[in-house]
Image (tube, rainbow, N blue to C red):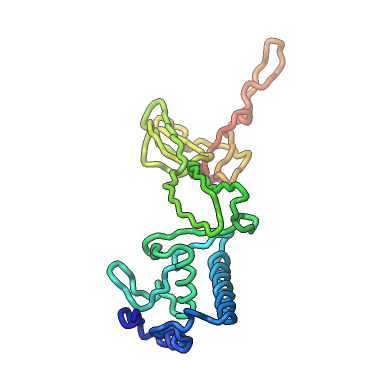
Amino acid sequence: MQLAAFPPPAGDAEFLAVCSSLGLTDERTPYADPSPELRALLVEAERSGRETIDALMTGGADLVNGWREAAHLFDYNLDFFEVGTIDAPEWKIADRTTAYATRAVAARAGLWGNHGYEADYFITAMDADGDQLSGAHTYELRLENYEPVTNSFTVEEGFKLEFKHELKPLEAQLEVFSRPTGAKIWINNMAQAQATPARFTLLPGSYLVSVHHPVFDRYIGKRIIIVKVHPDTRQVWAHDDRPVTYKTNRAGRRVVDSDPSCIQSIYGFDQLRLIT
């Protein structure tokens, strides 16, 4: 009666024939009062089938660090596409047997979820050591550079939980001033659109900040001697290319008056031009 009211698609004809051979499509079920042997067989079949579905739900080759993404968990529909659904090969499981198994996993894990083109979720049933989540331990999920969020819950048999948090990225405020104002700003050797004074919102971390004002243009063309290079930060340590000067002190001795190598400055690669 139900099949007549909701006829299956033509693609399910082979599976429907198997169901019919088992009496599952009869108007009266042959399993209402089974023999003890058949009852035991059905109970064992149900247990085995549930274990298979649970294994598919919690494991698989597509796990990454114990997590499974659910972008294609609801791609089992091959026949009926209503408003808002996408009928495209990349959102359908072509093999019907795989689609049936995926439908069973979706039903046990959380039916009526989102299609992957609407939202994606990540699911886990084990911890970082590969142990099944049982409620016996306390866990902490970490995502670098985001503010922490606390949520408490108890894991029990047959437990399913869905909670959503809008993670806020950690941010730091950088303010750059100069005197005189109007200096150009570089952050990690990348020119910025703003000039001093300016404020920047950055992720926590280490940054190289440099400023340049036209008042210092007289330094353009100055010769320097590089004494140390840091390619990772694209910086050099250098001093002015001037000779050491000497003077005579009150005791009549000749002493160093000025040694440029004692005063080193940091320059970015983009501030330098090789001349020799």
Comparing 89 with 20, the one in front is: 20
Frontmost residue, 91 versus 103: 103
Please report the residue visible at 47 percent of the width from the left and 36 percent of the height from the top. 210
Name above or below for residue 24 compared with residue 114: below
- Where is residue 105? Give x, y as percent: 49, 69
Q: Nearer the viewer, residue 59 or 18?
A: 18
Looking at the picture, tell me which residue is in the foreground, 34 or 128.
34
Inspect this view and state whether residue 273 appears: no
The picture places residue 13, in percent across and down from the top left corner, at 40, 87
Residue 75 seen by the camera: yes
Please state the horizontal and vertical placement of residue 123, each as a whole percent of the image. 51, 59
- Tally of numbered discs: 0
Quadrant location of the N terminus in the rendered image: bottom left
At 65% across and 18% down in the image, what residue appears?
247
Q: Quadrant of residue 107?
A: bottom left
Residue farthest to the top?
Answer: 250
Name the spot of residue 146 as percent of width and height, x first: 48, 44
Residue 129 vertical position relative to residue 28 in the rendered view, above or below: above
Q: Is residue 209 left or right of residue 66?
A: left
